[in-house]
Image (spheres, coloured by chain):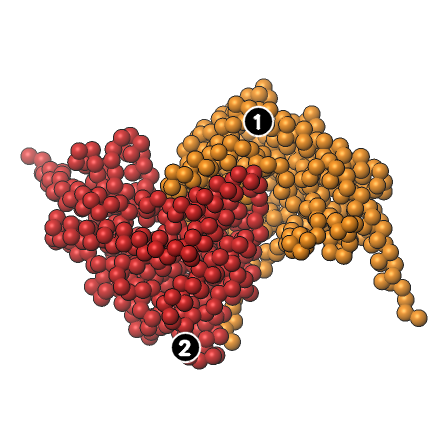
Chain colours: A red, B orange
Amino acid sequence: MFAERYADRVEFLSPSSIRKMMAIARDLIAHGKTVYELNIGQPDIRCIPEFSEAIDRKANTGQINYSPIVGETYLRETYARYLNNFFDHQKRPHLVIDTENVLISVGASHALTATFLGICNPGDEVLVVEPYFSPYKGFLAVAGGTLRAIPTRAEDDFALPPAEEIEKLITPRTRAILLNSPNNPSGKIYSPEEVERIARICIEHSLFIISDEVYREMTLSDQEAFSVLQVDFANDEMNEKLKNAIIMIDSASKTFSLCGVRIGFVVARQPILEKLALVVAHTTACVSDIMQYGVAGAYDAILSQPSYLQEMRQVYRERLEATIAAIDEYLPNVIAPKPSGAFYVMLKFPEFEDITEFSHFMLEKFNIGNETVAVTPAASFYLTPGFGRNEIRIALVVSPEKMRRSIYIIAEALKAFRQFKANQVRPML
Amino acid sequence: MFAERYADRVEFLSPSSIRKMMAIARDLIAHGKTVYELNIGQPDIRCIPEFSEAIDRKANTGQINYSPIVGETYLRETYARYLNNFFDHQKRPHLVIDTENVLISVGASHALTATFLGICNPGDEVLVVEPYFSPYKGFLAVAGGTLRAIPTRAEDDFALPPAEEIEKLITPRTRAILLNSPNNPSGKIYSPEEVERIARICIEHSLFIISDEVYREMTLSDQEAFSVLQVDFANDEMNEKLKNAIIMIDSASKTFSLCGVRIGFVVARQPILEKLALVVAHTTACVSDIMQYGVAGAYDAILSQPSYLQEMRQVYRERLEATIAAIDEYLPNVIAPKPSGAFYVMLKFPEFEDITEFSHFMLEKFNIGNETVAVTPAASFYLTPGFGRNEIRIALVVSPEKMRRSIYIIAEALKAFRQFKANQVRPML
């Protein structure tokens, strides 16, 4: 028998808990069950119409061609304009981004993979603020690297540890610190002081600062996101070092409800981008030209109509309010810190040791009027063993009424699960 | 000063000569020069109209969503149907492909990267038939692997060496043999006996056989491509081993003139695909749903209208005839074997030691009526040092008239280059 052998890195890859639940949910939906898919950050909102219009124009030219490995100039230029404009509106100093500072990738996932492949040898380490977006671990494992946690906890409002504690985690193999603000899954928006703390550590220890800012536009309160591009040490030498350390990651997926477009961005100094572009060229050759054309249409549109994003934020805020109110009403024992950004809520169930079984029970063995809810068990968002085992993440991806209905279903599923477990453990006579 | 440090693998990556010429050509075009871009396999043919129609339909739903990591079922199913249908029409035995044997990737480049990342540890080796599509080297370098050449030569009509000679190249680190038929750049279509020879070596030495078949539909003569899926050892045990060794790579780019769509395929047994899907999930998360939708429309179309591909082949055959006739007329000293498949011609210039300088001279310093030609110096298609240095690759991507004009321009550029060099080396008095 021919024995397949695989690369060692494959041993460190597993389907994310998000994707595992997605596969089960889709199968149930295909068989007629109604599932509120709160397990994945896939908005139900129609994508921005200017995207569809641009796509139609491009498709009808009949010319769907290879793109330069750094991406199409029109998208790089438009995105740079969008980003500068975003910061200018906040009336704070920021690094000015030029077309040559922008690299296009196949979504933020590919931007991160290319970054890790570009800066990490096998055995290298990256520090990440925990809880963290679980696929990061596998993106780094592809490059042979290992993720190490900077722990933050819900009970401290996910505040970053002091600099000394973070510095204790740095080893000779550490290559970067990865920050994600607004944070998926916690919804935390790090303060300017916190972002500067990380930036300072990075330049003092010659680490890259990888800043995943895909939820920049997704704010759920008055607190605005603070970008690594806005850090100003008021010291030329330090500012110059920072410029050489920044790798900022962005995506069109959440901003425009375009998760299926697979367009991401890396923002960095040109010498860094040149290296990362080589990785892009040797992983995907280039990025779809027609998708870049459509996304350029979307960024162009919000430059002239900022109301699009204001309305989108309002949609998510209404969903959040309905969700928090429903949790207070139906799940009074659950701890659910109100997020400042992104579009997720973490729910901690003190009665559980491990919530995985309940999550599967609710999805696969429970329904009310043939309806149920898919959620993501949150243990995979933590590296520290044992953490997050009694937490789930839900995404605000359906209407306020459906969010409320989902929380009700979760509460009823809990009762049914208690009954199910009580029956299951009844001793034999 | 903050010193950026990069991963060792980046040292092994460089922009391909194809892409280098593309960047220069695009810049010249932007400045008003007419450049026949024969340097890249980017057809000028309008893409299949059913693609555009499908894209319009999908874009107008406003729902552009994450896709399953293995790809959308409708595209996997449609592609499997296309492939079985293709082989059935050849009236030869073949492995029957099911939906579960198909994994969708971001083009064949990503399919190959995922394969190499999935099967190669750093230091592992892959054997490739030389001349080979030069980006393979970088795709493998991303995984830390090294490409080793199975040499074939134009003067032997690119025939494969005997099995014993190929087996001498196998080391304990060899993981796979990579075959590309029809071959880019040589245009060689390997015979059933040659494909079986490689397959037999692979199963006897427990190697994967990676078969890049993206030019399957691009035949320039009566010889049809023979797929690794058509190998039949008439021996159950060997056939079973073969099934476990096959990783077949395909793409929508060339078949439908859709290079910018970035949709590729891996065909393999499901246990292999499960591993490679994990790499896809941790490099790009998933593939664009709207591009998959469009490509499914394209495959659906050719199932009912096989004339589309017959007409496309006729277009390339007319370009080839015009090109060969023009070479005979304008470049009588050039050796240009007539290709059987793909859409490239290799031209060997016996008068040169290294043709790189001429290629750049023609593109950047020469024109006739503001027109010139971009070609790819072929040394990068060889691993063996010194080979291919006096060869260029041209792609049949413009009309017969423009191909003829391009050959004329190359001939005139040669005269001008000789003059330029003669002046350049004139000794100082």
Residue under the point 76% across and 34% down: B322
Mark 1 belongs to chain: B
Is residue B289 placed above or below A285 in the rendered structure? Answer: above
Expressed as whole percent of the image width and height from the top left, the position of residue B392 reads: 74, 46
Residue under the point 89% across and 64% down: B426
**Residue B163 visible in the picture:** no
The tag on residue B427 is none
Work out whether residue B30 or residue B355 is closer to the camera in this orientation and state it: B30
In the image, taking residue B404 as reference, residue A6 lies left or right, namely left
| Mark 1 nearby-residue class (10 Å; few <14, some 14–19, many ≥20) | some
Count of marks, rendered view:
2
Q: Residue furthest left?
A: A429
> Gap in Å between the C-alphas at discs 1 and 2?
65 Å
Expressed as whole percent of the image width and height from the top left, the position of residue B388 reads: 74, 48
Work out whether residue A286 or residue A298 is closer to the camera in this orientation and state it: A298
Which residue is identified by label 2? Answer: A233
The tag on residue B230 is 1
Of badges 1 and 2, nearer the viewer stands 2
Residue under the point 54% across and 53% down: A72
| Mark 2 nearby-residue class (10 Å; few <14, some 14–19, many ≥20) | some
At mark 1, the secondary structure is helix
Is residue A110 placed above or below A429 in the rendered structure? Answer: below
